[in-house]
Amino acid sequence: MKTIRIVIIGIVIALIAFLIFYKTEKINIGGIWTSKEIVLDGKTLYPVKSDSLMQANAFDIIIDDWTNSLYICNQDTIRANFTIKKDSDNKLRMKLTSSESSLNGNFSLEMDTLSLGPNVYDVYAILESGETLLYIQRTVYYQSQKTILHRRGTP
């Protein structure tokens, strides 16, 4: 009975240590993105000249990390499954599979982050393969996990 208790305690301690020091290589791109430019097989879906003055017809791109799915939403919803991997040059590649023929294949994934303030970031992503381009943007509000220490004389 004593040895079983020691083994269980050892396994729990090892599991806790593993979870503390484990770092994932997965990039987090899940969320709702706003389209900046969408080109499928050389045809520009967004922005077209009639949309240049109004941003109301922008496509929403929903990326679901849970099911590894990408949705292009407007009148018709286009769905694609994806996997993200790094190639030999340490560049990100996204493999898309979809019923839409232009969204099948390996896409290069480039991400850029622009800081707008201490807690606000704009994240830009470009998915490009041949004549297909998805240029998307998302604003991320980041709340710091550090507590602010109270200083004397401040409310």
Image: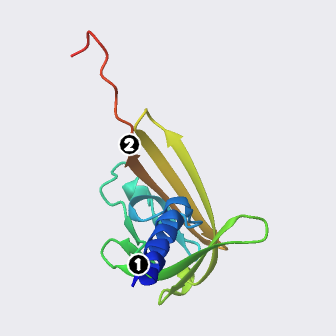
Seen from the viewer's position, the closer of residues 55 and 145 is 145
Residue in view at x 40 percent, y 48 percent? 139
Seen from the viewer's position, the closer of residues 9 and 20 is 9
**Residue 127 position by quadrant:** bottom right
Secondary structure state at the residue bearing disc 1 = helix
**Residue 47 position by quadrant:** bottom left
Q: Which residue is mark 1?
A: 5
**Res 107 label:** none
Q: Quadrant of the C terminus?
A: top left
Residue 55 in view, yes or no? yes
* Three-letter amino acid code of the residue under disc 2: Gln
Direction from residue 140 to residue 85 in the image, left or right: right
In this rendering, the label closer to the viewer, 1 or 2: 1
Residue in view at x 34 percent, y 29 percent? 148
In the image, residue 149 above or below residue 127: above
**Mark 1 burial class by Cα count in 10 Å: few <14, some 14-19, many 20+:** few
Q: Position of residue 141 (x, y in %)?
A: 36, 45
**Mark 2 burial class by Cα count in 10 Å: few <14, some 14-19, many 20+:** few
Q: Position of residue 134 (x, y in %)?
A: 53, 66
In the image, residue 117 above or below residue 128: above
Secondary structure state at the residue bearing disc 2 = loop
In the image, residue 58 above or below residue 140: below
Q: Which residue is mark 2?
A: 145
* Three-letter amino acid code of the residue under disc 1: Arg
**Residue 77 position by quadrant:** bottom left
